[in-house]
Image (tube, helix red, strand yellow):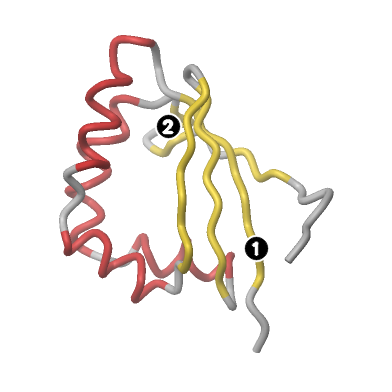
Amino acid sequence: MCMYRYAFMMRLKDTSVIEEYEQLHEDIGKEVLEAHQRAGFRNYSIYRHGLDLFAYFESEDPEGCFTRIAQEPIMKEWWAKTNPLMETDGNKPRFIPIREVFHMD
């Protein structure tokens, strides 16, 4: 099976949460990382520009990653910390897929 690249955007609520959001990711627990690996996320990165977050990962099944990660018990704890810092649709971060327009190996 081939590896697909997937990118999406999210947005922080306001400038007052930037430091907390970045600190959470700096101190991310091993359990959260392992949950992402079990779900199929590879080479996962998040970049920030102002309040905008740009995320990128690779996977054999990008759409399935989101279903599997939601079933990981540790993620409920993680999202309870991160979701209040982000713009949301209901109780989930507002999530905007980004189309790839160029790639070079």
Left or right relative to 40: residue 5: right
- In the rendered image, which quarter contains the C terminus? bottom right
In the image shown, does 12 or 77 lie closer to the viewer?
A: 12
Element type at mark 1: strand
Q: Position of residue 92 (x, y in %)?
A: 41, 39
Q: Amino acid at mark 1?
A: Arg
**Quadrant of residue 17 in the image?**
top left
10 or 44: which is nearer to us?
44
- Report the residue marked by disc 2: 90
Residue most toward the front?
A: 105
Viewer-nearest residue: 58 or 61: 58
Q: Position of residue 51 (x, y in %)?
A: 47, 19
The Cα atoms of the two marked residues, 1 and 2, are separated by 27 Å
Q: What mark, if any, has residue 5 been given in the picture?
A: 1
Give me the residue at 26% from left, 69% from top.
34
- Position of 98 with respect to 69 (left or right) is right
